[in-house]
Image: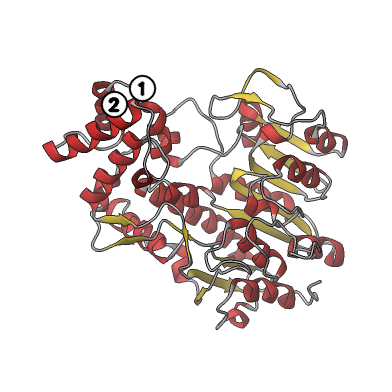
Amino acid sequence: MGFAHKKLAADYIARNSKGKALLSDAFPVQGSIATNCLNSDVTDSAAAATALSTGRKTNKGMVGMLPDGSKPETILEAVKSKLNMAAGIITTTALTHATPACFAAHVSSRGKEEEIALQLASSGVDFLAGGGIRYFLPKGYADKKKDAFGKTIASVRKDSKSPLDIFKKAGYDVFTGHDGAAAFANYTPAKSSRVLAAFTDYHTPYQTDIAGNPKQNTPSLDVVVGKAIETLSQNENGFFLIVEGGLIDQAAHINDAAGVVYETAALDKAIGTAYSFYKLHPGETLIVVTADHETGDLSSESPKTDILQNISISVDKLQSAYKGDTAAFYEVLSERFGLKSLDPSEKAMIDYAAALADAGKTASAYGGYSPPAIAASKILNNRSGIIFGSYSHTAKKVPFSAVGVKSEQLKGISDNAALGGAMFELLGIAPS
């Protein structure tokens, strides 16, 4: 989530939702941080989130671990072990994805999601919610049960270990799949409650796809944050909560402008839930909003964000919408992607991309994604004045903002590891 992502979402909200600017843009402390890691100016989520969680720079791909193999204590682990606070992790991606993992796991590669799931299960984190149930189930698990978005739940583990059973044996209240999502909505935590909620097979769905599937029951990010605060705030020593709007990054990778806007707006709504708690406890609460890195090299000048209204399919889902029938694909674009008519040059873009897909080919111009989906995205972006210069991460600085107790001490910070280290200092904890 770079500066342009926030600006685009704020513009959309102001013009089309009759709302105000993003809440985090109004926080009294505003700044920007560099995100480079030890072995690259362009970081990834693992190295960047490790910097934020430990105050230490590391190499790309490393989760809560330094190049020498050491495993520094994360801020989440420190508040639990040294201050007896409660702690939670929430994400719109899989719980085993790099960013959430960096706060409670230590592995040499972000690809070790099976090991990350096991470490999360033994981490003692009091509240975990997101997707990725596939990594918490033993090898061979597959049945007719559906996740919150209607996809069949199936394990991808290569061993017979069951992190889900570890959670259950430890007394967690567990919510998985479609049925778990329904039960979660009515859940009332007790003082001693600990929660695992893994609603989807892997990542949770985009806001656009939620709009296009009325049968899904994935809880919204703001609802999950509210439930986490309700659970964790019962600890008399306070709590630490990391919340990731991870699909902002995923949408930017695939150059999905509507996805960027809707996911950033959803994160801002969740920040609003946290801010409501802050207003009740202003002398005890700190909220910090930032990003791992910028994705997509996004820019826009006077964007026509009205074009992004009423879209009910993500560019990711558009990839599977093309099945060799261009007429059917045009129908999807008209009904769900805001492209009700195509001029000859736009139609030529789709037809050329469809021919590539039919031949089983992709090209660097399509970022390795389905050519018809990316062609459709380019058309929508061209119409709306939105430019993506990349399908990858960039070295651009990212915004950070803060409000609450001791937030003024974060002014002037210009690096992600420095921001991570400052979190320890604010709590009186020496980083390991």
Model colouring: secondary structure
Observer-nearest of 291 and 160: 160
Residue nearer the viewer, 226 or 56: 56
Name the residue located 28 percent from the left edge and 55 percent from the top edge: 386
Q: Where 141 falls versus 107 (above or below)?
A: above
Q: Which mark is residue 361?
A: none
Q: Is residue 70 left or right of residue 266?
A: right
Q: Tell me residue 346's x, y (percent).
A: 18, 39
- x, y percent for residue 410: 60, 79
Check disc 2 and give the amino acid type.
Answer: Phe
Image quadrant of residue 66?
Answer: bottom right
Labelled pair 1, 2 in contact (Cβ < 8 Å): yes
Residue 369 lies, with reference to residue 429, above or below; the image says above
The secondary element bearing badge 1 is classed as: loop
Label 2 SS: helix
**Left or right: 93 in relation to 6:** right
- The three-letter code of the residue at mark 1 reads Lys
Q: Residues within 10 Å of mark 2 (few under 14, many from 20)?
A: many
Expressed as whole percent of the image width and height from the top left, the position of residue 259 reads: 40, 46
In the rendered image, which residue does mark 2 sit on?
329
Q: Residue furthest left?
A: 344
Q: Which residue is mark 1?
A: 323
For the point 50% across and 76% down, the residue is: 31
CA gap between label 1 and label 2 equals: 8 Å
Query: For the residue carrying disc 1, how many other residues have a C-alpha within 10 Å: few (<14), some (14-19), or many (20+)?
Result: few
